[in-house]
Amino acid sequence: MNGQSSLGRAAALARLAWQYLWARPLTAVLNWLMLSLGLAAVTLVLLVSTQLDRAFERDLQGIDLVVGAKGSPLQLILSGVFHIDVPTGNIPLREVEALAQHPMVAQVIPLSLGDSYQGFRIVGTTPDYLALYGAQFAQGQSWQQPLQAVLGAAAARGLQRPDLPAGTSLVGATFIGTHGLGGGGHAHGDHPYTVTGVLAPCGCALDRLILTSTESVWAVHETHMATDAEDLALLRAEREVTVALVRYRTPMAAVSLPRQINSQTEMQAAAPALEVTRLLRLLGVGADVLRAFGVVLLAVAALSVFIALWNAVRERRADLALLRMLGAPPTRIAGLLLAEALWLAVLSSGFGLLLGHALTEVLGQVLAAQGLLTVTGWAWVPEQAAVPLMATGVAVVAALLPALQAYRTDVGDLLGAP
């Protein structure tokens, strides 16, 4: 019975606190919005930073070194691994083949870039590139000969014709690539690609790509550039690729191989881990600014809640005196103010999380439209569990002094107040 009585008193206290909260609707809405916006900013930072960290880690798996043309090492990583920048140039195939024979190298995966279709990059490579990410096929199979292509999951969704029923297989469909990575270039109409397979979503760079054999890229460009048989033979003798992804045979290669490539060849070697660390440091500045903005909003919200509750104690003298006369102990009076602040925390937590996820989804759609990294608002990260705790902490801290004031106020003073 005592347990039921305690629950009843707690429920009554919560109902009364709810009524008190909305007795001043404008103040309640203002505090709710400010606290929600601060929590939404923190949620946005948590979601985006966590997903980007995971994407970088996932796309870099199995890649120890990226080799390409001289230029910016970061640009080389962004274009060759994440496919979100333009390449630094091409490198001779013979040098890549020589690199594959190096005793410290276990594997070399060549990538040839330069064409696209409807904004999705066409990448010439080998089946080892699919194996690198453990790609699985949702439809069809891998290419078997030149001018056959495999679509990543996002590319397949983007290329699905609106007049076809959802889920219609794209295997057997044909398309014509255009020169350049941004679209709008020369269409290679004499060399259409045939789709042989569609990959299942992997959450990695493959989702945004159209994959084919390296020979396909050579065939398209050599025929387009050659004016006669002699030119064609010369182009074939001087074939190039854009990037080589390297996996070390021994840890000692990390010390000597990049230096050897950079000093003794016309190629450039970039360590993905080092460059991504620099990139995350740059991105971290923006995340810190947004996080600081959220903290400022939370601080302002805490101050606003404190002022509102402090004034509420003064405005509710008659109500508090009546509660004390009816036998309510000081702890229950203080608990009433804490419950009011906790109601605000609960409402703000729910809306702040919802708003943070919505903003993340909007950002993800913008990034997807530009062919950049995948970010979604439908994800949940464990760090978000701290958001309700943060809201509760802000509300409790803001309510402590007003609750203490209500606790210490004597019933005689309340009754004697004008």
Image: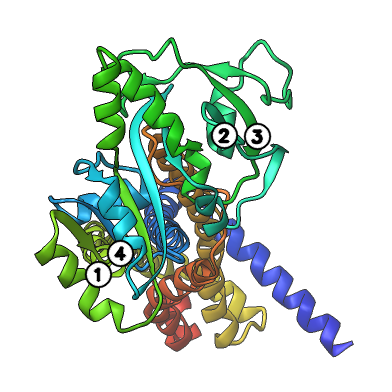
Q: In the drawing, does residue 225 fall left or right of residue 207?
A: left
Mark nearest the camera among 1 and 2 is 2
| Cα–Cα gap, marks 4 and 3 | 30 Å
Kindly indicate whether the residue at mark 3 contacts the one at mark 4 (C-beta within 8 angstroms). Answer: no
In whole angstroms, how far apart are the C-alphas of marks 1 and 2? 30 Å
Q: Mark 2 points at which residue?
A: 151
Number of the front mark, 4 or 3: 3
The amino acid type of the residue labelled 1 equals Leu
* Front one among 267 and 399: 267
* The N terminus: image quadrant: bottom right
Disc 3 to disc 2, how far (Cα)? 6 Å
**In the drawing, what numbered circle is on residue 272?**
4
Instruction: Tell me whether circle 1 and circle 4 mark residues in contact (CB < 8 Å).
Output: yes
Of helix, strand and loop, which one carries label 4? Answer: helix
Crowding at dot 4, Cα within 10 Å, few <14 / some 14-19 / many 20+, comes out as many
- Which residue carries the number 3 mark? 197
Mark 3 or mark 1, which is nearer to you? 3
Between 60 and 9, the one nearer to me in the picture: 60
Numbered tag placed on residue 274 in the rendering: 1
- Above or below — where is 25 with respect to 371? below
Write the residue at 20% across / 41% down.
89
**Quick check: marks 3 and 2 in contact, CB under 8 Å?**
yes
Relative to residue 256, is residue 195 depicted above or below? above
| Residue 157 position (above or below residue 400) | above
Q: How crowded is mark 1: few (under 14 residues within 10 Å), some or many (20 or more)?
A: few
Mark 3 neighbour density, 10 Å: few (under 14) some (14–19) many (20 or more): many
Res. 119 in view = no
* Residue 234 seen in the figure: yes
Point 62% across, 80% down: residue: 325
Q: Is residue 137 left or right of residue 180?
A: right
